[in-house]
Amino acid sequence: MSQIAPQSLTIPTSYGQSLLTLMRERGHQEADVLAGTQLTAVQLQAPRGQIEGWQYAVALGNALRLDGDAGLAYELGLRSQVTKHGFVGFGLISCGTLREAIEFSERYFKTRVSTFTSEVSVVGDQAIISLRETVPMGAQRSLVMDMVLVELCSLFARVLGLEPGVSGWTSEIWVTYPEPAAYARFKDKLPLFRFNQAAEQIRIPARMLDEPIATADTVSMQLAIDRCEQDIANQIAKQVVDQTTASQVTARMQCRDGRYPDIAAMAQALLLSERTLKRRLQDEGTGFQTLLDKARYQDSMRLLANRSLAIKQVAQAVGYEDPANFARAFSKWSGSSPRAWRQQQDADGPI
């Protein structure tokens, strides 16, 4: 079995809060939506907080299992507000034209949602915004793409002061996957989708790039740029020098041949005694077993998304010789068995 790389990309807590709000409106309990995420509703209220990508994926999976409506991705995208994105949103509405706003989002959107990168080009009379994920998104790829692409179209429309529900959409969304069943119910509310294309893209008439933004303000825009640049600098510094022991353990918590490092091997790798490692993790509010379980859970979800692997193979890949023990552990982490989790991903539509 090849080495499984850890994932540490994050997204704003506002995404989790939006999902939780929608599910509350649909009559579901917070605890059920957040099962297995290691998150609380209070944590999601932090204005500039971040959660890990895997935590949102688990919450989204829970929501789909509870509600059975894959169309909630469209609804989440349509609900998005500029204010949801903090200083990035503030910068968007302060730009002089849509071209400036798109260029601004191309550089700074990644400070909010590091799971995607974007690139802008003009081909003929079309402006094309291509979106690419920075890591494989597994079973929920199409749902997350739907949400983000609709959200970006909504944001650009709102920046221009447009009301697509009244005047109609000027944008199109191109995606690589087939049309899901939920699209028919939301079709009249959404930009035109073109399925089975070569890439994920938003396309708008190039003439709109120089449309002025009524809320443009150079002073406000510079303030937003300064803040976003500081966020980028902070992220780079965190990547280069991360002072927490927990993050160092997480970075080394890699599975090789079905085995994760035990605490003795981890302490040796960090040039610490086992006692010191335990104490430092405890001081940071966590423990070695918690970090091991977290790594196993994330790796399990990525492997279960690969339908060519039997559940027994997934169990062995994350260190469980007995599939029954793996099933009990996975149920504790996620609230459902590995088989039920995989069946739910299948039921959620084409990936």
Image: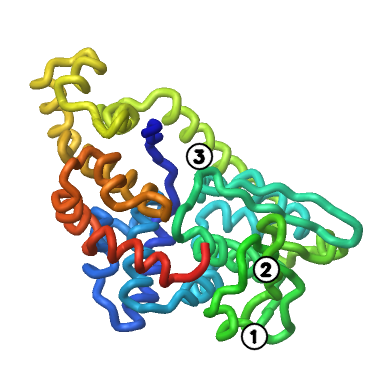
Camera sees residue 247? no
Q: Residue at x 65, y 63 (%)?
A: 175
Camera sees residue 205? yes
Report the Cα–Cα distance between label 3 and label 1: 38 Å
Q: Quadrant of residue 264?
A: top left
Q: Which residue is mark 2?
A: 195
Q: Which residue is mark 3?
A: 231
In this rendering, is residue 285 above or below 344?
above
Amino acid type at mark 3: Asp
Amino acid type at mark 2: Phe
Q: Position of residue 7 (x, y in %)?
A: 40, 40
Q: Earlier in the sequence, mark 1 or mark 2?
A: 1
Q: Position of residue 79 (x, y in %)?
A: 52, 74
Q: Nearer the viewer, mark 3 or mark 2?
A: 2
* Tag 3 secondary structure: helix
Q: Earlier in the sequence, mark 3 or mark 1?
A: 1
* Tag 1 secondary structure: helix
Q: Which residue is mark 1?
A: 188
Q: Residue at x 20, y 20 (%)?
A: 265
Q: Position of residue 244 (x, y in %)?
A: 28, 29
Q: Residue at x 36, y 27 (%)?
A: 242
